[in-house]
Amino acid sequence: MVDIPYRSIPDMLRKNAAAFPGKLALKYRKQGRFVTLSYGEYYQRALMAARGLKKCGVKPGEHVAILSENRVGWVIADMGILSIGGVTVPIYATNTPEQIEYVLNHCGARIVFVSNKYQYAKLLKVRERIPALELVVSFERFLGEAGLPVCTFYQLSEIDFPISARERSELEAGIDCIGADDILTLIYTSGTTGVPKGVMLSHGNILFDAWYGIRKIGLLSEREVVLSFLPMSHVLERTLGYYMTIMSGTMLVFADSIEKVPENMMEVRPTVMVSVPRLFEKIYSRIFENVHQMPALKRTLFHWAVGIGKEYVEARYIEGRSTPFLALKYNIADRLIFAKLREKFGGSMKMFASGGAPLDKTINEFFWVIGLPIFEGYGLTETSPAITVNTMEQIRFGSVGTVLEHTEVRVDADGEILVRGPQVMVGYYKDPEATGEAISDGWFRTGDIGHLENGFLYITDRKKELIITAGGKNVAPQPIENELKLDKYISSAFVYGDRKPYLTALLVPNLERIIEFARERHINYYDMDDLVIKEQVVKLYVQRVEEINSRLAPYETIKKFVLLPRDFSIEGGELTPTLKLRRKMISEKYLDKIESMYAENGN
């Protein structure tokens, strides 16, 4: 194994701050305009946070929580915690007070960083049930209440007092004591079912995954600009969007919000972004929505260009052959169509990384066609996260790529994917039984079903999410849901049918398309609740579903469906913070609608 040149994450920042102290590391919005911190300034701010935490008595190995949306304070606090040997416990900003209570009590944190008064208010609601909590450190200034003291991040860091030579020497001596085996973070899996488990990841776990991820992808350089919008609480953004960026000496830019990503892309002109499939699904739908409204000649030109692009991508990246005449036609298509599309992403985008859930093959291929390759990978919180990834040299649409160096993958007799490598977690916090069930002889059971083909890994579905019909057929819902979501009239889909005689679905209409349909057909309605039950609308979706069913095996077809007036959301409890379906929550929330689809035929 090639030696990784860092002992720990704070050691990595220290060395890069010394190598290029003036290079821009962080860019973020402050009072309406973007400001920056250099690598040298970032390191100094991290040491100041570490100094403050040390004065609060935080010891090596102690858990310190961060309850905040993405912002510059998040990464400075994180580096401060890690620099004194502490363990960062991230909490999703979308979590409820009860979920926050569980995490804080389970990890025993006595200090928590919060973004603002809104997050502080959640702590107040459960104050009597989180007795270990002693101090709240806020990134924004507000008055706290009796019984739960608050200080600002600036006060903790004593921002007006630079780090002295003696303080620096003491703090860096502490950094020298942090090793690869020391725990870096405790991440509570948001999960789609059950109580969250605290995943213990070491500095070595994360360093390995970031280092060998960079080696495999081979595109990151000091000149890149990475736009960050996924929650830092999630390991995908934490490792790929944050630590890998610092490791590469690139600039990390914080998006204002998920909603502002398109606007921010035009402002900061990023070259790299990490995302989950939902963003790509929405962009793909919007592009084809616009194409749908084009004059016939422009539509024809667009589809010609995409056809040429598919041939070119297949020849160059899949088959690896040179085709000068096809390349010429592709260049024409690129100038006429694709270059204009790329301008919508800021004009400098080189690549996307996608993980967290399966990316539809059609959508992935389309992005490669327009010159914005998506490197789809695979991993879990327990694997830091990357296990496999597609690259420029090794790409198969529909697969999640080939394994990282020094990583082994095998498929068990029942189809479950097992992985062994330096990125596999230390274990679940306070849960040796669950750790023993998950890891045996170094092999981690992923819970995912899939197969290997010519070195490429293909994921079929989650083992626990497989639908077993009353007829005994095993059905993976996600590929069917992806097929449904590709229809121009469908925004989201949830397939159900475990222990049932046939499959059913909850479908969320594409709002713009269905309103356009109603206008064209002169359908009168009061609101979306009224529109989705109109006879003409239901008939339209019967036709759309029948068309999709024609491409599926008989036991995979959707026999009945219900149209929902509103999309699934994090706030509604149907989605995880990384926009994956919470299957158990959805089936419970819409139980009456689901059961009604089986009532007439019995179970």
Image (cartoon, grey):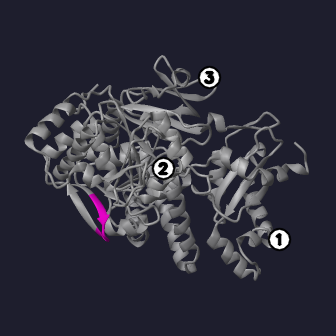
Task: Please identify the residue farthest to the left as the structure is shown.
Answer: 165
Q: Earlier in the sequence, mark 1 or mark 2?
A: 2
Q: Are marks 3 and 2 in contact (CB under 8 Å)?
A: no
SS of the residue under disc 1: helix
Q: Which residue is pictured at 53% across the width and 20% down the height?
A: 436
Q: Is residue 55 magenta?
A: no
SS of the residue under disc 2: helix
Give coordinates of residue 182: x percent, y percent.
32, 27
Classify mark 2: residues with Cα within 10 Å, few (<14), some (14-19) or many (20+).
many
Determine the main secondary structure of the stretch shown in magenta. strand
Q: CA distance from mark 1 to mark 2?
A: 48 Å
The stretch of residues the image draws in magenta is: 27-33
Q: CA distance from mark 3 to mark 1?
A: 48 Å
Query: With respect to residue 207, does 329 lie above or below?
Result: below
SS of the residue under disc 3: loop
Quarter placement of the C terminus:
top right
Callout in the foreground (1, 2) = 2
Name the kind of residue labelled 2 in the image. Answer: Leu
Q: Which residue is pictured at 40% across the width and 58% down the height?
A: 116
Which label was assigned to residue 535?
A: 1
Mark 2 highlights which residue? 123
Mark 3 highlights which residue? 413
Of residues 11 and 80, the one nearer the viewer is 80
